[in-house]
Amino acid sequence: MAKRWTNDLGPQDVTPKSLYLDRRRIIAGIAGIGLAGMAGGAAGASTDLTPNDWKSITSYNNFYEFGTGKDDPAKHAHRLTTAPWSITIDGMVERPGAYALGEILSKMTIEERIYRFRCVEAWSMVVPWNGFELADLLQMVGVRPEAKYVAFETLLRPEEMRGQKFPVLEWPYVEGLRLDEAMHPLTLMATGIYGRTIPNQNGAPIRLVVPWKYGFKSIKSIVRITLTDRRPPTSWNKANGREYGFFSNVNPEVDHPRWSQATERPIGGGLFARRQPTLMFNGYQREVAALYEGMDLKRNY
Ligand code: MTE
Protein backbone atom coordinates (compact mmCIF):
# COMPACT_ATOMS: atom_id res chain seq x y z
CA MET A 1 0.00 0.00 0.00
CA ALA A 2 1.42 3.38 -0.95
CA LYS A 3 2.00 5.61 2.06
CA ARG A 4 0.02 8.81 1.75
CA TRP A 5 1.94 10.99 4.17
CA THR A 6 3.97 13.96 3.07
CA ASN A 7 6.46 15.93 5.02
CA ASP A 8 8.00 19.29 4.34
CA LEU A 9 10.73 18.80 6.92
CA GLY A 10 13.86 17.05 5.86
CA PRO A 11 16.93 15.69 7.59
CA GLN A 12 18.49 19.15 7.37
CA ASP A 13 15.98 20.33 9.96
CA VAL A 14 17.33 18.10 12.68
CA THR A 15 20.75 17.72 14.24
CA PRO A 16 23.07 15.96 14.61
CA LYS A 17 23.31 14.70 11.08
CA SER A 18 25.23 11.57 12.01
CA LEU A 19 22.16 10.33 13.82
CA TYR A 20 19.68 9.94 10.99
CA LEU A 21 19.05 6.31 10.83
CA ASP A 22 17.10 4.54 8.22
CA ARG A 23 17.69 6.95 5.40
CA ARG A 24 16.55 4.31 2.97
CA ARG A 25 13.07 4.35 4.41
CA ILE A 26 12.88 8.12 4.12
CA ILE A 27 13.85 7.85 0.49
CA ALA A 28 11.39 5.01 0.00
CA GLY A 29 8.74 7.20 1.63
CA ILE A 30 9.43 10.04 -0.77
CA ALA A 31 9.28 7.64 -3.72
CA GLY A 32 5.94 6.38 -2.43
CA ILE A 33 4.60 9.90 -2.27
CA GLY A 34 5.73 10.49 -5.83
CA LEU A 35 3.94 7.39 -6.99
CA ALA A 36 0.78 8.46 -5.24
CA GLY A 37 0.94 11.73 -7.13
CA MET A 38 1.44 13.79 -4.00
CA ALA A 39 5.01 14.95 -4.54
CA GLY A 40 6.00 18.48 -3.72
CA GLY A 41 6.31 20.54 -0.56
CA ALA A 42 3.53 20.37 1.96
CA ALA A 43 1.44 23.39 2.88
CA GLY A 44 3.37 26.01 4.78
CA ALA A 45 6.65 24.55 3.60
CA SER A 46 9.55 25.91 5.54
CA THR A 47 12.93 24.43 6.20
CA ASP A 48 14.43 27.26 8.21
CA LEU A 49 13.14 26.01 11.55
CA THR A 50 15.42 25.85 14.55
CA PRO A 51 16.76 22.32 14.67
CA ASN A 52 16.21 20.40 17.87
CA ASP A 53 18.87 18.22 19.30
CA TRP A 54 18.51 15.14 21.49
CA LYS A 55 19.06 17.18 24.62
CA SER A 56 16.24 19.67 24.15
CA ILE A 57 13.80 16.97 23.04
CA THR A 58 14.57 14.83 26.10
CA SER A 59 15.01 17.46 28.80
CA TYR A 60 12.15 19.91 28.20
CA ASN A 61 9.04 17.79 28.63
CA ASN A 62 5.44 17.70 29.74
CA PHE A 63 4.61 14.45 31.50
CA TYR A 64 2.58 15.30 34.58
CA GLU A 65 2.80 11.73 35.88
CA PHE A 66 6.33 12.74 36.91
CA GLY A 67 5.64 16.31 38.01
CA THR A 68 4.58 19.58 36.46
CA GLY A 69 8.01 21.13 35.92
CA LYS A 70 9.58 20.92 32.48
CA ASP A 71 12.61 19.14 33.96
CA ASP A 72 10.65 16.79 36.25
CA PRO A 73 10.12 14.06 33.64
CA ALA A 74 13.83 13.86 32.81
CA LYS A 75 14.62 13.78 36.54
CA HIS A 76 12.10 11.20 37.65
CA ALA A 77 10.98 9.06 34.71
CA HIS A 78 13.89 6.64 35.05
CA ARG A 79 11.85 4.99 37.81
CA LEU A 80 9.31 3.72 35.31
CA THR A 81 9.62 0.06 34.34
CA THR A 82 8.78 -0.31 30.67
CA ALA A 83 9.29 -4.06 30.26
CA PRO A 84 7.30 -6.19 30.16
CA TRP A 85 4.71 -3.98 28.47
CA SER A 86 1.43 -4.84 26.85
CA ILE A 87 -1.42 -2.87 25.35
CA THR A 88 -4.98 -3.98 25.90
CA ILE A 89 -6.94 -3.32 22.74
CA ASP A 90 -10.65 -3.69 23.30
CA GLY A 91 -14.12 -2.37 22.56
CA MET A 92 -15.40 -2.50 19.00
CA VAL A 93 -12.63 -4.64 17.52
CA GLU A 94 -12.63 -8.08 15.91
CA ARG A 95 -9.67 -9.41 17.88
CA PRO A 96 -9.61 -7.82 21.35
CA GLY A 97 -6.88 -8.78 23.77
CA ALA A 98 -3.78 -7.87 25.71
CA TYR A 99 -1.05 -7.61 23.08
CA ALA A 100 2.57 -7.82 24.19
CA LEU A 101 4.49 -4.85 22.81
CA GLY A 102 7.06 -7.19 21.27
CA GLU A 103 4.33 -9.02 19.39
CA ILE A 104 2.93 -5.75 18.07
CA LEU A 105 6.36 -4.49 16.99
CA SER A 106 7.15 -7.74 15.19
CA LYS A 107 4.23 -7.00 12.87
CA MET A 108 4.77 -3.26 12.33
CA THR A 109 7.07 -1.34 10.02
CA ILE A 110 9.10 1.26 11.88
CA GLU A 111 9.70 4.44 9.91
CA GLU A 112 11.32 7.76 10.65
CA ARG A 113 8.96 10.74 10.63
CA ILE A 114 10.30 14.23 11.18
CA TYR A 115 7.36 16.20 12.50
CA ARG A 116 6.71 19.63 13.87
CA PHE A 117 5.48 19.42 17.45
CA ARG A 118 3.40 22.31 18.82
CA CYS A 119 2.39 22.43 22.47
CA VAL A 120 -0.80 24.27 23.48
CA GLU A 121 1.47 26.38 25.72
CA ALA A 122 2.82 28.00 22.51
CA TRP A 123 6.26 26.41 22.29
CA SER A 124 7.37 24.12 19.52
CA MET A 125 10.04 21.68 18.43
CA VAL A 126 10.95 19.56 15.46
CA VAL A 127 11.26 15.89 16.40
CA PRO A 128 12.56 12.92 14.38
CA TRP A 129 10.28 10.16 15.62
CA ASN A 130 10.55 6.47 14.86
CA GLY A 131 7.31 4.59 14.87
CA PHE A 132 4.51 2.97 12.92
CA GLU A 133 1.13 4.15 11.73
CA LEU A 134 -1.68 3.70 14.21
CA ALA A 135 -3.81 2.65 11.22
CA ASP A 136 -1.64 -0.45 10.80
CA LEU A 137 -2.21 -1.47 14.42
CA LEU A 138 -5.96 -0.88 14.13
CA GLN A 139 -5.99 -2.93 10.99
CA MET A 140 -4.16 -5.72 12.82
CA VAL A 141 -6.92 -5.98 15.44
CA GLY A 142 -9.78 -5.29 13.03
CA VAL A 143 -12.04 -2.29 13.63
CA ARG A 144 -15.73 -3.16 13.75
CA PRO A 145 -17.96 -0.98 11.51
CA GLU A 146 -19.86 0.60 14.41
CA ALA A 147 -16.68 2.14 15.92
CA LYS A 148 -16.42 5.93 15.58
CA TYR A 149 -13.73 6.94 18.08
CA VAL A 150 -10.50 5.63 19.56
CA ALA A 151 -9.79 6.09 23.28
CA PHE A 152 -6.29 5.87 24.76
CA GLU A 153 -5.12 5.38 28.32
CA THR A 154 -1.73 5.88 30.01
CA LEU A 155 -0.31 3.52 32.61
CA LEU A 156 -1.51 4.05 36.20
CA ARG A 157 1.32 3.18 38.55
CA PRO A 158 1.81 5.76 41.31
CA GLU A 159 4.70 3.76 42.85
CA GLU A 160 6.74 4.59 39.77
CA MET A 161 4.95 7.72 38.59
CA ARG A 162 5.24 10.04 41.54
CA GLY A 163 3.08 12.75 39.99
CA GLN A 164 0.10 10.40 40.15
CA LYS A 165 0.12 10.86 43.93
CA PHE A 166 -1.11 14.40 43.38
CA PRO A 167 -4.52 15.32 41.96
CA VAL A 168 -3.23 17.74 39.29
CA LEU A 169 -5.18 15.72 36.74
CA GLU A 170 -7.55 12.80 37.08
CA TRP A 171 -5.43 9.67 36.62
CA PRO A 172 -4.87 7.76 34.45
CA TYR A 173 -4.29 10.30 31.67
CA VAL A 174 -6.74 9.61 28.85
CA GLU A 175 -7.06 10.91 25.30
CA GLY A 176 -9.14 10.26 22.23
CA LEU A 177 -9.41 10.71 18.49
CA ARG A 178 -12.17 10.41 15.96
CA LEU A 179 -11.67 7.18 13.99
CA ASP A 180 -10.79 9.04 10.77
CA GLU A 181 -8.14 11.04 12.64
CA ALA A 182 -6.75 7.84 14.14
CA MET A 183 -6.63 6.19 10.70
CA HIS A 184 -4.88 9.15 9.07
CA PRO A 185 -1.44 8.20 7.75
CA LEU A 186 0.23 11.04 9.68
CA THR A 187 -0.95 9.57 13.01
CA LEU A 188 1.97 7.75 14.51
CA MET A 189 2.68 5.38 17.38
CA ALA A 190 6.21 6.35 18.36
CA THR A 191 8.74 4.01 19.92
CA GLY A 192 11.91 5.93 19.17
CA ILE A 193 13.56 9.31 18.67
CA TYR A 194 16.70 9.79 16.57
CA GLY A 195 16.75 6.06 15.95
CA ARG A 196 17.13 5.29 19.64
CA THR A 197 14.60 3.76 22.00
CA ILE A 198 12.23 6.48 23.15
CA PRO A 199 13.31 7.80 26.57
CA ASN A 200 10.90 7.37 29.47
CA GLN A 201 10.33 11.13 29.75
CA ASN A 202 9.08 11.20 26.16
CA GLY A 203 6.52 8.44 26.72
CA ALA A 204 8.27 5.08 26.69
CA PRO A 205 7.81 2.51 25.55
CA ILE A 206 5.10 3.71 23.17
CA ARG A 207 3.20 6.97 22.72
CA LEU A 208 0.89 8.62 20.25
CA VAL A 209 2.00 11.47 17.95
CA VAL A 210 -0.66 13.52 16.15
CA PRO A 211 1.39 16.31 14.57
CA TRP A 212 -1.47 18.62 13.53
CA LYS A 213 -2.93 18.76 17.04
CA TYR A 214 -1.69 20.40 20.22
CA GLY A 215 0.84 18.23 22.01
CA PHE A 216 -1.44 17.15 24.85
CA LYS A 217 -3.37 14.95 22.41
CA SER A 218 -0.16 12.93 21.93
CA ILE A 219 -0.64 10.68 24.96
CA LYS A 220 2.37 8.89 26.42
CA SER A 221 3.09 5.40 27.80
CA ILE A 222 -0.09 3.84 26.44
CA VAL A 223 -1.54 0.67 28.01
CA ARG A 224 -5.05 0.62 26.59
CA ILE A 225 -6.70 1.44 23.26
CA THR A 226 -10.48 1.17 23.09
CA LEU A 227 -12.65 1.44 19.98
CA THR A 228 -15.99 3.01 20.81
CA ASP A 229 -19.02 4.70 19.25
CA ARG A 230 -19.05 7.52 21.82
CA ARG A 231 -16.71 10.47 22.01
CA PRO A 232 -14.30 9.48 24.80
CA PRO A 233 -13.44 11.77 27.72
CA THR A 234 -10.00 13.39 27.52
CA SER A 235 -7.85 14.49 30.47
CA TRP A 236 -7.37 18.19 29.72
CA ASN A 237 -10.93 18.61 28.57
CA LYS A 238 -12.14 17.10 31.85
CA ALA A 239 -9.79 19.37 33.80
CA ASN A 240 -10.86 22.55 31.97
CA GLY A 241 -13.31 22.12 29.12
CA ARG A 242 -13.42 25.81 28.27
CA GLU A 243 -9.69 25.94 27.62
CA TYR A 244 -9.02 22.51 26.10
CA GLY A 245 -11.35 21.01 23.53
CA PHE A 246 -11.66 17.51 22.17
CA PHE A 247 -10.27 18.40 18.74
CA SER A 248 -7.43 20.74 19.72
CA ASN A 249 -6.22 21.17 16.19
CA VAL A 250 -3.36 23.66 15.97
CA ASN A 251 -5.02 26.86 14.79
CA PRO A 252 -3.34 30.28 14.85
CA GLU A 253 -6.75 31.94 14.48
CA VAL A 254 -8.35 30.46 17.57
CA ASP A 255 -6.69 31.76 20.71
CA HIS A 256 -6.51 29.99 24.02
CA PRO A 257 -8.69 31.95 26.47
CA ARG A 258 -5.53 33.08 28.31
CA TRP A 259 -3.00 33.54 25.48
CA SER A 260 -2.63 33.95 21.74
CA GLN A 261 -1.99 30.93 19.54
CA ALA A 262 -0.84 33.05 16.58
CA THR A 263 2.86 32.51 17.27
CA GLU A 264 5.09 30.03 19.03
CA ARG A 265 8.47 29.93 20.76
CA PRO A 266 10.82 27.42 19.18
CA ILE A 267 12.62 25.47 21.91
CA GLY A 268 16.38 25.21 21.62
CA GLY A 269 17.01 28.66 20.24
CA GLY A 270 17.77 30.17 23.63
CA LEU A 271 15.59 32.31 25.88
CA PHE A 272 15.47 35.16 23.36
CA ALA A 273 14.71 33.01 20.33
CA ARG A 274 12.44 34.81 17.92
CA ARG A 275 8.84 33.68 18.00
CA GLN A 276 7.61 32.24 14.76
CA PRO A 277 4.15 32.25 13.23
CA THR A 278 2.05 29.19 14.02
CA LEU A 279 0.78 27.41 10.93
CA MET A 280 -2.76 26.20 10.38
CA PHE A 281 -2.94 22.53 11.42
CA ASN A 282 0.71 22.99 12.40
CA GLY A 283 1.72 23.01 8.73
CA TYR A 284 -0.20 19.86 7.80
CA GLN A 285 -3.21 21.65 6.33
CA ARG A 286 -2.90 20.03 2.94
CA GLU A 287 -2.94 16.57 4.47
CA VAL A 288 -5.67 16.97 7.09
CA ALA A 289 -7.97 19.89 6.22
CA ALA A 290 -10.40 17.52 4.48
CA LEU A 291 -11.09 15.79 7.79
CA TYR A 292 -12.75 18.96 9.07
CA GLU A 293 -14.53 20.21 5.97
CA GLY A 294 -17.62 22.21 6.85
CA MET A 295 -16.80 22.19 10.57
CA ASP A 296 -16.74 25.39 12.60
CA LEU A 297 -13.21 25.19 13.99
CA LYS A 298 -13.88 27.92 16.53
CA ARG A 299 -16.75 26.03 18.07
CA ASN A 300 -15.02 22.69 17.68
CA TYR A 301 -11.75 23.82 19.29
N1 MTE B 1 0.81 12.11 28.16
C1 MTE B 1 0.67 11.81 29.46
N2 MTE B 1 0.35 10.56 29.80
N3 MTE B 1 0.83 12.74 30.45
C2 MTE B 1 1.14 14.04 30.15
O1 MTE B 1 1.28 14.86 31.08
N4 MTE B 1 1.56 15.71 28.38
C3 MTE B 1 1.16 16.08 27.03
C4 MTE B 1 1.60 15.03 26.00
N5 MTE B 1 1.29 13.70 26.46
C5 MTE B 1 1.29 14.41 28.78
C6 MTE B 1 1.13 13.39 27.80
C7 MTE B 1 1.65 17.38 26.64
S1 MTE B 1 0.89 18.73 27.36
C8 MTE B 1 2.63 17.55 25.70
S2 MTE B 1 3.04 19.09 25.12
C9 MTE B 1 3.38 16.40 25.19
O2 MTE B 1 3.00 15.17 25.79
C10 MTE B 1 4.86 16.61 25.44
O3 MTE B 1 5.63 15.63 24.80
P1 MTE B 1 7.22 15.69 24.91
O4 MTE B 1 7.55 15.78 26.37
O5 MTE B 1 7.70 14.42 24.28
O6 MTE B 1 7.65 16.91 24.17
Image (cartoon, rainbow, N blue to C red):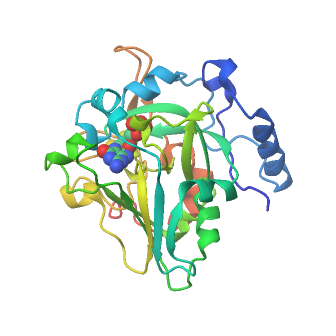
Instruction: Identify which residue, 115 or 23, lies in the foreground.
Output: 23
Residue 204 % position (x, y): 45, 43
Q: In this view, does 83 lie above or below 226?
A: above
Count every numbered label the image shows and give the total: 0
Q: In this view, does 242 lie above or below 90?
A: above
Toward which corner of the image does residue 101 lie, by quadrant?
A: bottom right
Residue 187 % position (x, y): 56, 55
The answer to whether residue 44 is visible is yes
Toward which corner of the image does residue 61 lie, by quadrant?
A: top left
Quarter for ligand 1?
Answer: top left
Instruction: Identify which residue, 160 or 60, lies in the foreground.
Output: 160
- For this orientation, the residue located farthest to the front is 84
Residue 138 % position (x, y): 58, 68
At 76% from the left and 42% from the top, the residue drawn is: 40
- For this orientation, the residue located farthest to the bottom is 146
The answer to whether residue 258 is visible is no
Residue 269 % position (x, y): 44, 16
Quarter of the figure with the C terminus = bottom left
Instruction: Identify which residue, 295 or 181, lies in the foreground.
Output: 181
Quarter of the figure with the N terminus = bottom right
At 60% from the left and 20% from the top, the residue drawn is: 15
Instruction: Identify which residue, 88 or 295, lies in the foreground.
Output: 88
At 14% from the left and 46% from the top, the residue drawn is: 166
Q: In this view, does 231 lie above or below 168?
A: below
At 44% from the left and 23% from the top, the residue drawn is: 56
